[in-house]
Image: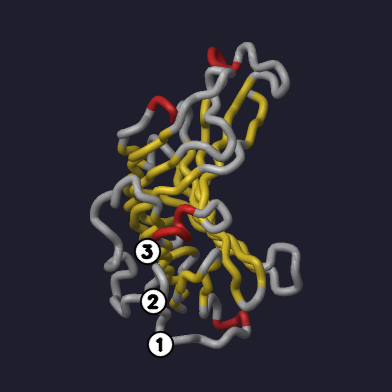
Amino acid sequence: MKPMRTKVLPLVVVFSSILASSGCANDDAGADGAGGQGGTGSEDPTAAAPDTWSGSEPHVDLHGNVAERTLDLVVEGADAADLGTAYCERNYKVPDLEDTSAWAAEGYLEKVEIKVNFFFDDALAEFQLELVTPNLTEEVGTTFDVADDAEVNIGISVDEDGPNAAEYEDAAVGGSATLEELDGEIGDDGLTFPDEAGTFGLYVDVELASGGAFKGSLTVHCGENDLETLE
């Protein structure tokens, strides 16, 4: 498997290698820098991951495989707190997009997506991890069995609309995810946290459909909400 080395710079994360077929040079020296670290060199791709959630201070500390590619993704300090680099998107189901009167009674938070924006070979790229299960606002502190109680999906998109577009997707088929924090003050509609307010914290330790493993801790500020009507 080809390692994806990471380095955190102001507002960007740089991967030095994703696929041998991508035509990109492989930087085996790793990448140490402000808030970042390179691969561990261990046969266990999750060896560098923390064993517990690292707390409410914004951070991304995730390690393992995505679609059979090794990833060490570390974002710290001001970079982790900046919505231009790392953030969550809350996805709500509501009965009517315009009429908020029944949102509190019938709506719910179905999914939270964590996203990290970065540049890869001068192309815009995005890491995504999503936790999907009904009524997330009522589940803080819950450890979900991802085989039965929740979905954890992971992906990396590179140069989405460009000539070198590539996408790597994976899904958890075993292990667990713990919703550690879903913080904020619910707005006047009785359901949603306001856009660009609140935080989301998660700890994951999962096995993936590709045969790999993925593990780590994160806490990020949240950006704009996404709303969809109930089916």
Question: Residue 163: which quarter of the image?
Answer: bottom right
Depth check, mark 1 against mark 3: the one in front is 1
Quadrant location, the N terminus: bottom left
Kindly identify the residue that appears in the image at 29 percent across and 75 percent down. Answer: 43
Where is mark 1, residue-wise? 29
Viewed as shown, does residue 229 lie left or right of 106? right
Residue at (63% x, 36% y) in the render = 226
The reply to whether dot 2 and dot 1 touch (C-beta < 8 Å) is yes
Compute the Cα span from label 3 to label 2. 11 Å
Relative depth, front residue between 28 and 147: 28
Q: Position of residue 49 (x, y in %)?
A: 30, 62
Q: Quadrant of the C terminus?
A: top right
Q: Residues within 10 Å of mark 3 (few under 14, many from 20)?
A: many
Amino acid type of the residue that numbered disc 2 sits on in the rendered structure: Gly
Question: What percent of the width, then of the height, locates residue 74?
Answer: 40, 64
Q: Are marks 3 and 2 in contact (CB under 8 Å)?
A: no
* Residue at disc 3, secondary structure: strand
How far apart in space, not on screen, are marks 1 and 3 (Cα)? 18 Å
| Mark 1: few/some/many CA within 10 Å (<14, 14-19, 20+) | few
Q: Nearer the viewer, residue 180 or 152?
A: 180
In the displayed orientation, state which residue is furthest to the left: 51
In the rendered view, would you say 105 is above or below 162?
Answer: above
Picture coordinates of residue 165 (x, y %)?
A: 69, 69
Residue behind mark 2: 38
Q: Which residue is mark 3?
A: 63
